[in-house]
Image (tube, helix red, strand yellow):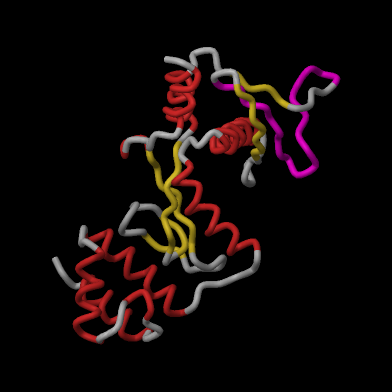
Amino acid sequence: MTNLEGLKKLREPFPDHQVNQLPKPLQKNAEKGRCRECGGWHGLPALHLDYVGHAALTDRFLEVDPEWSWEPLAIGADGLPVFDRNGGLWIRLTICGVSRLGYGDADGKSGGNAIKEAIGDALRNAGMRFGAALELWHKGDLHEAAEAQGQTLSPADEARAALLETLRSKGIDPKDAVAQFRQDHGVELRDSADVDAIKALAEQYRGQR
């Protein structure tokens, strides 16, 4: 495999079995409950962001370049990587002869797990600069950008998100719900501000077996 072919392969979508989901509650203080989609216990309703884990990403790196490597941008007197004041780590990732920077943090973890989390996060971030799992990062970045700006979803958007969770848990094609809403109300589901109508549709599907 040439370097050009390897870099191109980095951008190929990951197979479904290598894609995990991370729940992100729509509100910071959302009441926790058992999620029907992922089975986890977290704030509801929540979006489920797709992401690729460290093992799957490493497998892709090895596939395109068995000699890929990464190095921290700063080394301390003890010979170990230097973390910034926020607990983050800057790295340089080199694949197929090309080097790009990445940054990762521990996401609130502590101890040895914090170091591993920061390294894994930095590799995912740097890998994204090569196009690895880029389509998954897009959705997550939009969500995090809204949080960083202090934005909250409108009641209608929250109702649509809750409806989507219901459809996923029931294995129902969202297109069916869109068509049903259009037939019942004469407007597109994505444009509607009628919270009660959206919630009613979710309740209708929730009651199906």
Choose top left, top right, bottom left or bottom right for residue 47.
bottom left
For residue 61, above or below residue 39: above
Quadrant in which the C terminus appears: bottom left
Q: Nearer the viewer, residue 100 or 140?
A: 100
- Image point 54% across, 13% down: which residue? 67
Q: Is 93 inside the magenta-drawn segment? A: yes
Choose top left, top right, bottom left or bottom right for residue 186.
bottom left
Quadrant in which the N terminus appears: top left
- Image point 45% across, 49% down: which residue? 22
Indicate the position of residue 92 as horizontal and vertical percent values.
67, 27
- Image point 48% across, 42% down: which residue? 134
Q: Is 60 inside the magenta-drawn segment? A: no
Which residues lie in the magenta part?
A: 77-95
For residue 33, above or below residue 69: below
| Residue 2 located left or right of residue 119 | left
Q: Nearer the viewer, residue 31 or 201?
A: 201
Which residue sits furthest right? 77
User: Taken as a whole, is the magenta stretch helix, strand or loop?
Assistant: loop
| Residue 82 located left or right of residue 154 | right
For residue 66, above or below residue 19: above
Indicate the position of residue 155 as horizontal and vertical percent values.
46, 79
Choose top left, top right, bottom left or bottom right for residue 182.
bottom left
- Image point 46% across, 39% down: which residue? 133
| Residue 21 located left or right of residue 77 | left
